[in-house]
């Protein structure tokens, strides 16, 4: 919305006036919960009174609702939309599949806030293994073609990530453990939690760029110090910035040959840098930057760095710099100049 030359009816002046729109911190209460956010407020240029503009009001209500959901950990409308796209499923079929009333999802998309319980159910579905499970239990409520579409999509996703751990998918902790087992403590190698996150991130990124497959299903979020998988964060949090001791025993054969190639390569290419350097590196690259959106440098941010965005970015780097193997990746990474403050 252009801030200049907007004319609106001012109740105080009882005339159309030009208005000034300011960004202000706004407080609202939704269901007894105080919400704080930065929204827009319009003022009459003539008398200085606040002027009601429905478009701005709608935007503020939408923002307040997002904040409210964030506070309570309730799924966002945009996340529900993503779910529908992800599984190529309609609003009614998804509601049916979950055993809910047909219009439930439609209402959620229009802005009705789901209960915590229903929200959790929807969030679980972000994991294709969970979706597969529900489809196995309840898929007969769907029309044949609709069901096939979802199944194709899940198959596509699970093909990306293989599972050899007794039906459990490989997760970020497995990948982290693989790296931790490479640490030579006697030789003075240290690895902090921050650094570990970056190594796992680059493993996932280059796996996608080289093999068009993912290693782990979990998503990275664009935290202040770079990409972070929350599960990993909570797992290693107790060590703070200190080196993490040698890890648990890991059956390295849960990884296939392609994955081992990537993991060993990432260790050689990125493992020699410290956490701060790797942080600066991820801060230069599009996926983290784009996912941060409008967040300021010090803003807490849990926006997901979409797998598609990671894949696209590192694939384009691979093409642009003709990186064909780990040695060439090493040459590329060594050639990046970062000024450390
Ligand atoms: Zn006025």
Image (cartoon, grey):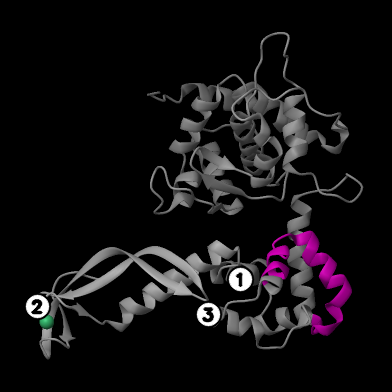
Please tell me whether mark 2 sits on a helix, a strand or a loop: loop
> The N terminus appears in which quarter of the rendering?
bottom left
Q: Magenta span: helix, strand or loop, mainly? A: helix
Please tell me whether mark 3 sits on a helix, a strand or a loop: loop
Which residue is the site of mark 2?
47
Task: Determine whether the beta carbon of the residue marked 3 sits less than 8 angstroms from the nearest atom of ligand 1.
Answer: no
| Residue in the image at 45% along x and 26% along y | 336
Which residue is the site of mark 3?
111
Task: Determine whether the beta carbon of the residue marked 2 sits less than 8 angstroms from the nearest atom of ligand 1.
Answer: yes
Which portion, as a residue range, is magenta?
Answer: 119-144
Q: CA distance from mark 2 to mark 3?
A: 35 Å
N-terminal of the pair, mark 2 or mark 1, is 2
Which residue is the site of mark 1?
80
Q: Residue furthest right?
A: 166
How crowded pointer 1 is (Cα within 10 Å; few <14, some 14-19, many 20+) is rated as many
N-terminal of the pair, mark 2 or mark 3, is 2
């Amino acid at each position: 919305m252009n801030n200049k030359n907007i004319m609106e009816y001012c109740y105080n002046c009882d005339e159309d006036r030009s208005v000034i729109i300011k960004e202000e911190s706004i407080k609202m209460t939704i269901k007894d919960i105080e919400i704080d956010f930065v929204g827009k407020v319009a003022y009459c240029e003539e008398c200085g009174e606040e002027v009601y503009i429905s478009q701005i009001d709608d935007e503020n209500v939408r923002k307040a609702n997002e904040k409210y959901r964030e506070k309570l950990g309730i799924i966002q409308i945009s996340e529900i939309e993503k779910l529908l796209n992800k599984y190529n499923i309609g609003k009614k079929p998804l509601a049916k599949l979950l055993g809910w009333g047909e219009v439930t999802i439609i209402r959620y998309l229009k802005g009705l806030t789901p209960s915590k319980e229903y929200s959790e159910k929807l969030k679980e579905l972000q994991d294709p293994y969970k979706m597969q499970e529900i489809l196995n239990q309840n898929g007969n409520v769907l029309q044949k073609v609709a069901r096939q579409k979802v199944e194709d999509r899940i198959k596509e996703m699970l093909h990306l990530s293989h599972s050899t751990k007794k039906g459990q998918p490989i997760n970020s902790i497995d990948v982290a453990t693989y790296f931790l087992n490479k640490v030579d403590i006697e030789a003075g190698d240290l690895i902090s939690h921050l650094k570990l996150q970056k190594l796992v991130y680059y493993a996932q990124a280059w796996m996608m760029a080289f093999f068009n497959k993912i290693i782990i299903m979990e998503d990275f979020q664009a935290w202040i110090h770079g990409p972070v998988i929350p599960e990993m964060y909570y797992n290693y949090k107790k060590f703070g910035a200190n080196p993490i001791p040698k890890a648990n025993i890991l059956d390295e054969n849960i990884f296939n040959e392609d994955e081992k190639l990537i993991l060993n390569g990432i260790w050689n290419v990125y493992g020699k840098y410290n956490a701060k350097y790797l942080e600066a590196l991820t801060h230069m690259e599009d996926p983290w930057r784009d996912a941060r959106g409008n967040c300021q440098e010090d803003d807490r941010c849990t926006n997901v760095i979409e797998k598609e965005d990671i894949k696209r970015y590192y694939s384009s780097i691979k093409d642009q710099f003709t990186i064909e193997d780990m040695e060439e990746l090493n040459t590329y990474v060594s050639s990046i100049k970062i000024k450390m403050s």
